[in-house]
Image (cartoon, helix red, strand yellow):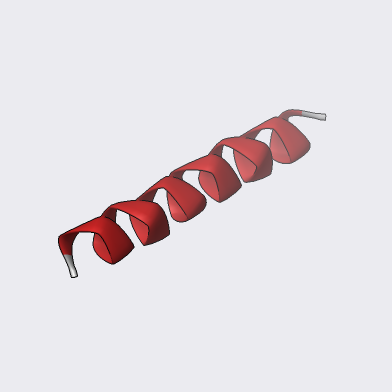
Amino acid sequence: MLFCYVRGEYEQIHYFTLITILILV
């Protein structure tokens, strides 16, 4: 259960990073 929570947080950070890169580029 904790692993799923961590994975969910990682996915949110991953998508947020992609969006930030797209905005900067």
Tell whether 21 sits left or right of 1: left
Tell whether 23 sits left or right of 4: left
Task: Name which residue lies at 72% across and 29% down.
Answer: 2
x, y percent for residue 11:
58, 49
Name of the residue lying farthest toward the left:
24
Tell whether 20 sits left or right of 16: left
Q: Which quadrant is the C terminus positioned in?
A: bottom left
Task: Name which residue lies at 54% across and 41% down.
Answer: 12
x, y percent for residue 10:
53, 46
Residue 8's place in the image compared with 21, above or below, is above
x, y percent for residue 24:
16, 60
Task: Name which residue lies at 69% across and 31% down.
Answer: 5
In the image shown, does 3 or 19 lie closer to the viewer? Answer: 19
Q: Which quadrant is the N terminus positioned in?
A: top right
In the image shown, does 18 or 25 lie closer to the viewer? Answer: 25
- Which of the 4 quarters of the picture holds residue 22? bottom left
- Which of the 4 quarters of the picture holds residue 21? bottom left
x, y percent for residue 19:
38, 54
Q: How many marks?
A: 0
In the image shown, does 6 or 19 lie closer to the viewer? Answer: 19
Residue 1's place in the image compared with 23, above or below, is above
In the image shown, does 20 or 1 lie closer to the viewer? Answer: 20
Residue 5's place in the image compared with 24, above or below, is above
Name of the residue lying farthest toward the right:
1
